[in-house]
Amino acid sequence: MVHSPTGPHPRFLLVPASEPQFPHLQTPDPGDPVWNMRWALCTRRSSGAAAPGSGATIFALSSGQGRCGIAVIRTSGPSSGHALRILTAARDLPPARHASLRLLSDPRSGEPLDRALVLWFPGPRSFTGEDCVEFHVHGGPAVVSGVLQALGSVPGLRPAEAGEFTRRAFANGKLNLTEVEGLADLIHAETEAQRRQALRQLDGELGHLCRGWAETLTKALAHVEAYIDFGEDDNLEEGVLEQADIEVRALEVALGAHLRDARRGQRLRSGAHVVVTGPPNAGKSSLVNLLSRKPVSIVSPEPGTTRDVLETPVDLAGFPVLLSDTAGLREGVGPVEQEGVRRARERLEQADLILAMLDASDLASPSSCNFLATVVASVGAQSPSDSSQRLLLVLNKSDLLSPEGPRPPPDLPPHLLLSCLTGEGLDGLLEALRKELAAVCGDPSTGSPLLTRARHQHHLQGCLDALSHYKPSKDLALAAEALRVARGHLTRLTGGGGTEEILDIIFRDFCVGK
Ligand SMILES: Nc1nc2c(ncn2[C@@H]2O[C@H](COP(=O)(O)OP(=O)(O)OP(=O)(O)O)[C@@H](O)[C@H]2O)c(=O)[nH]1
Ligand SMILES: [K+]
Ligand SMILES: [Mg+2]
């Protein structure tokens, strides 16, 4: 799109059209919501934080707080090069993107601060797209605060706010919104699977997918609009509407498949609910303590020991899990234990994966039979779908079984043998858990990119809903509008046309220096 000098965004006319380094500034398109939001960000003047691109150069400690071997302090903004020259007392900047050893001194007193590695990243080839500098200094608190104070004394520099580096990267088109979310998740990733998933999102897989879908819709829209303009004119290729129709229907199928997967990505991000249940004294609390490697629950030979739901976050086979210990299920006991049983049943309903536990040496008891007939049978009877619960049946206390003892009943559902006492069978249980959790959370190393946030699900659902109003055989104008609404949802998913509030929520996840 080309703008006349009197167009709405004359500022961009200062950028030569051939300038290849600012792809996001090259073709300003006020009709493009992504571009519009970046424009809004660039020109925004908020109360506290200066808006990206407002001329301020920011600095912050980007590595963790506290005593450490090396600390990284970075700057971003137009005065970065100036600050680097001042702190290194040099006329020239070091070679770009190479580590150089330099003596840093306080510009006010000339006092040496540290011998440090400095890196100069001239924009736009930097994380934020602006001129950036990294100072890799010795990690003592006095060195860090000395360098930060020295930077603060350079005119045009101010401390960065939380997430401000990433926000500038977003405003400058270096990251889209799903990539920003991936970065936030990567910083907070606690388990292997979360890290893999965050890295994939940071790499832009979800963004690519959405952009591809949006392109499909743009093409379909072009076809429908051409049809509106030219009708059944000879100039129009034959079958344009049919082609658009085929592509839209295929897109609906793809969206439906991703939405069915939606809960998995969210579980991977915030933890799957695994609930341990069974009759009293089966060894539920023993298992919870074993899996979490800490004494979460009281274990005792007295049936009815656990009353409250005890929840603990654990890393199970690389997956984030919220593991709940619950009261043993039985009727006809005192009011306190009954309340525990009620809470246990309530928690059971929220489980993604149920660890159903029985005492292997006590399978014929009424409580075991009752548990098998109610809980285990009812989960097994669910029709398999994404929202259905999964269940692993574990027979504990295998150490009490003797070779001559009674064999487990032949109609027992598939199960695993375990002894919390000796640890026998634990490896098998962990392997089974890994498989179950990969099904519950999605496997981040394979398959299509997961939707990790409710926001993603909302926009994909919105897109799908809009497409259900696409009926070109009825009304072409309405069909075109449906395509526009659908495309708008996809654009907003990757950060276009979004509101400041969404950005604030996402960037709030970041710490200062990121
Ligand atoms: N022999 C043997 N005893 C076990 C094993 N696991 C647990 N126990 C014992 O079984 C008893 C009950 O264990 P808990 O972990 O308290 O059982 P629970 O299911 O949490 O019991 P409630 O909370 O009362 O419902 C304790 O005395 C444990 O030491 C096992 O694998 N083998
Ligand atoms: K017990
Ligand atoms: Mg217990």
Image: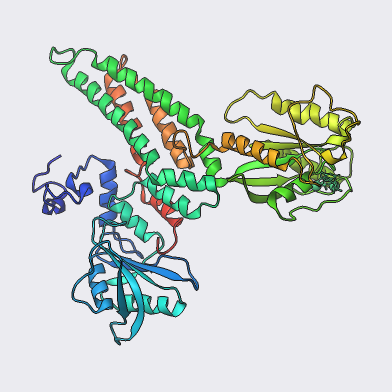
Q: Residue furthest front?
A: 403
- Is residue 41 positioned above or below 232 on the image? below
Closer-to-camera residue (370/503)? 370
- Is residue 447 positioned above or below 382 on the image? below
Residue 434 on image: x %, y %: 61, 39
Q: Residue furthest left?
A: 5
Residue drawn at point x = 23 percent, y = 25 percent:
222
Closer-to-camera residue (64/425)? 425
- Is residue 352 positioned above or below 12 on the image? above
Which of the image's four quarters has the C terminus? bottom left
Residue 459 on image: x %, y %: 41, 36
Residue 120 on image: x %, y %: 27, 65
Residue drawn at point x = 70 percent, y = 34 percent:
392
Can residue 347 be seen?
no
Can residue 377 be seen?
yes
In this picture, residue 475 sits left or right of residue 383: left
Question: What colour scheme governs how the chains and residues are painted in the rendered image of this protein?
Answer: rainbow
- Is residue 441 positioned above or below 226 on the image? below
Looking at the rendering, which quadrant does residue 166 occupy? bottom left
In this picture, residue 84 sits left or right of residue 289: left
Residue drawn at point x = 91 percent, y = 31 percent:
405
Looking at the rendering, which quadrant does residue 496 occupy? top left
